[in-house]
Image (cartoon, rainbow, N blue to C red):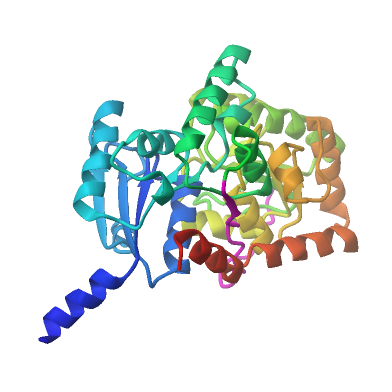
């Protein structure tokens, strides 16, 4: 056998996973790339939505053995999933988030047993939906659950919801990864009272930081109210939102005295997050938020809003109101979190190790 023939045979023998992602960016992009790194023996292919504001960076494209863009229109995207499956014959089609989950499970050529679905936060958990919209979303997920081979939840809460949709649903908990972050390049903090250096390279002392896209899910209003109370309790505290998005949310935050950085390149975001004295998480609903896990990896004290997904992770010190978030954050600005909270965060770090993620992905992908 010639060398090129041997190489082709070896390549065809590798298991193939087609990742289908409707919104390529933010935490989902980070998670999918973690999956690719976790099981490099698998051929990873990517089908993503064209025209998404988060374009695939060249280094991200290089992580995959093939990248395709979805056409516009829901029906066209369902057909494209089916066409690609017939052409590529992947061993697994892994759908990420609700819309992609719909495209894959409605694509008739894809066998149910080959479909893996990770919701990254079920839409039926959204608290901004009317009761009838939430009921419609739940009904759609219940129907589509019969076309789900494996529900690969990123939190215990997601698996609980998957089993509530179909009692005999096969589930697997694939934890997102907390990576120890070293060498973030953290510069000395400025000692002025400004929110940050002019070039955004440093955060000031006594900073409480939130991270993410300015949207309803992240509930910037909750953080804004906490900032007002936090500045009342400690006038020298600084409240910063690392990220950008909806201008209405930005204006509300700025009226509350919060500095909004706008969109940041990921390395810059990590470096600034490493400087924050407290990481605050205000989201209304989540799967297993990457920004929170990254803060844990950076050994930042965490204060988070009580929602089912975070309760299922066993995160300590959850709060229910903006006032409680402010009080807890100011307490952390003046005192250490304490041994109990530190021990639980250490456990969370272990539970979200790359080794555990790799083991569960090998199980889910069937090798």
Highlighted magenta segment, given as a residue range: 170-193
Instruction: Report x, y in % for residue 246.
Output: 49, 27
Q: Nearer the viewer, residue 169 or 237?
A: 169
Instruction: Please state the horizontal and vertical placement of residue 293, each as a whole percent of the image.
Output: 64, 55
Q: Is residue 151 above or below residue 105?
A: below
Residue 342: quarter of image: bottom right
**Closest to the observer: 166 or 64?**
166
Q: Main secondary structure of the magenta part?
A: loop
Q: Considering the image in quadrants, where does the N terminus appear?
A: bottom left
Q: Is residue 189 magenta?
A: yes
Per the image, is 163 magenta? no
Any part of residue 148 in sight: yes
Q: Quadrant of the C terminus?
A: bottom left
| Residue 190 seen in render | no
Residue at the spot 55% in from the left edge and 58% down from the top edge: 270
* Spot occupied by residue 164 in the image (x, y as percentages of width and height): 65, 35
Q: Quadrant of residue 287?
A: top right
Image: 23 above or below 38: above
Q: Residue at x 76, y 55 (%)?
A: 301
Please provide percent x and percent y for residue 366.
46, 63
Is residue 58 depicted above or below 224 in this figure? below
Horizontal side of 140 relative to 341 (left or right) equals: left
Q: Is residue 269 above or below residue 259?
A: below
Taking the image as shown, residue 18 lies to the left or right of residue 88, namely: right
């Amino acid at each position: 056998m010639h060398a090129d023939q041997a190489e082709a045979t070896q390549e065809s023998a590798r298991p193939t996973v087609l990742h289908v992602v409707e919104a390529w960016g933010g935490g989902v992009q980070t998670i999918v790339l973690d999956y690719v790194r976790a099981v490099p023996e698998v051929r990873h292919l990517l089908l993503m939505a064209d025209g998404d504001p988060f374009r695939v960076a060249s280094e991200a494209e290089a992580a995959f053995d093939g990248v395709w863009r979805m056409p516009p229109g829901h029906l066209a995207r369902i057909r494209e999933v089916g066409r690609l499956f017939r052409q590529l014959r992947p061993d697994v089609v892994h759908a990420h988030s609700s819309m992609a989950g719909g495209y894959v499970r409605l694509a008739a050529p894809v066998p149910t047993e080959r479909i893996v679905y990770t919701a990254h936060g079920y839409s039926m958990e959204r608290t901004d939906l009317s009761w009838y919209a939430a009921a419609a979303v739940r009904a759609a997920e219940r129907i589509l659950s019969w076309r789900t081979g494996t529900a690969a939840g990123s939190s215990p809460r997601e698996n609980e919801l998957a089993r509530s949709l179909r009692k005999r649903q096969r589930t697997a908990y694939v934890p997102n990864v907390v990576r120890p972050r070293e060498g973030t390049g953290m510069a000395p903090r400025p000692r002025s009272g400004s929110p940050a250096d002019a070039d955004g390279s440093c955060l000031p002392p006594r900073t409480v930081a939130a991270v993410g896209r300015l949207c309803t899910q992240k509930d910037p209003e909750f953080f804004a109210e906490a900032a007002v109370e936090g500045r009342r309790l400690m006038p020298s505290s600084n409240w910063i939102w690392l990220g950008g998005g909806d201008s209405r949310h930005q204006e509300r935050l700025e009226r509350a005295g919060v500095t909004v950085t706008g969109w940041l390149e990921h390395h810059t975001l990590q470096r600034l997050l490493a400087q924050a004295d407290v990481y605050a998480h205000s989201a209304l609903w989540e799967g297993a938020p990457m920004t929170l896990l990254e803060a844990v990896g950076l050994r930042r004290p965490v204060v988070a809003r009580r929602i089912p997904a975070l309760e299922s992770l066993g995160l300590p010190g959850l709060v229910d109101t903006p006032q409680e978030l402010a009080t807890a954050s100011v307490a952390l600005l003046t005192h250490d979190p304490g041994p109990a909270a530190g021990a639980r965060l250490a456990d969370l770090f272990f539970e979200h190790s790359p080794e555990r993620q790799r083991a569960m992905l090998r199980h889910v992908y069937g090798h």
